[in-house]
Amino acid sequence: MKKDIKIPKVANVYLVIAPEYNDLFKTNDWNVYIVNDKNVDIDLVLILSKGFDKNRETAQMKHKIDLLPTKSAVKFELMVEEVLVLDNEFKVTFFCENKLFEKTYLIPANTAKESTLRMVKTIGKRGIVIN
């Protein structure tokens, strides 16, 4: 039954949070990207995200990406200031080579800081890698 279901370990798929200037609203925003650093495409990426702490929880956001090509990234969520002070959980499920993969990523509260940024080649900008 449940114990017989084998879900392979996720490798070379990660999240990046990156600061970006929003020309339209004249604001400094933090955006979340999903990165596929595998040598194969991944299909039907489903992402459930929410922010939380001991006393609060945000509404759950749902995202779908039909295809995430090899060595590419897709921006899928804006993180507003009020959410950055919460722990943020991202449950990611996808298919790769006819296998189902699943992983939960956690961005701890107050992680989004300029001092922790590094260059992320796949997105071509500085960000914080979440594995």
Image (spheres, rainbow, N blue to C red):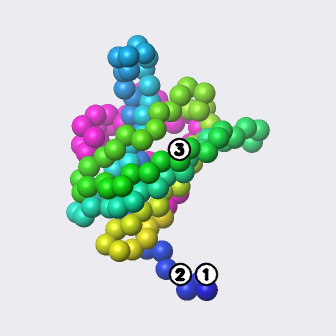
Q: Is residue 72 magenta?
A: no
- Residue at which label 3 appears: 107
- Residue at which label 2 appears: 5
The answer to whether the residue labelled 1 contacts the one labelled 2, judged by CB atoms less than 8 Å apart, is yes
Q: Farthest residue toward the right? A: 55
For label 3, the SS is strand
Q: How many other residues sit within 10 Å of disc 1, few (<14), some (14-19) or many (≥20)?
A: few
Q: Which mark is residue 84?
A: none
For label 1, the SS is helix
Magenta extent? 103-131
Asked whether 126 or 49 is in front, the reply is 49
For label 2, the SS is loop
Whether residue 131 is visible: no
> Where in the figure is residue 122, as x and y percent of width and height?
25, 45
Label 2 vs 3, first from the N-terminus? 2
Q: Quadrant of residue 125?
A: top left
| Residue displayed at 44% across by 25% down | 29
- In this rendering, which labeled residue sits more in front, label 2 or label 3? 2
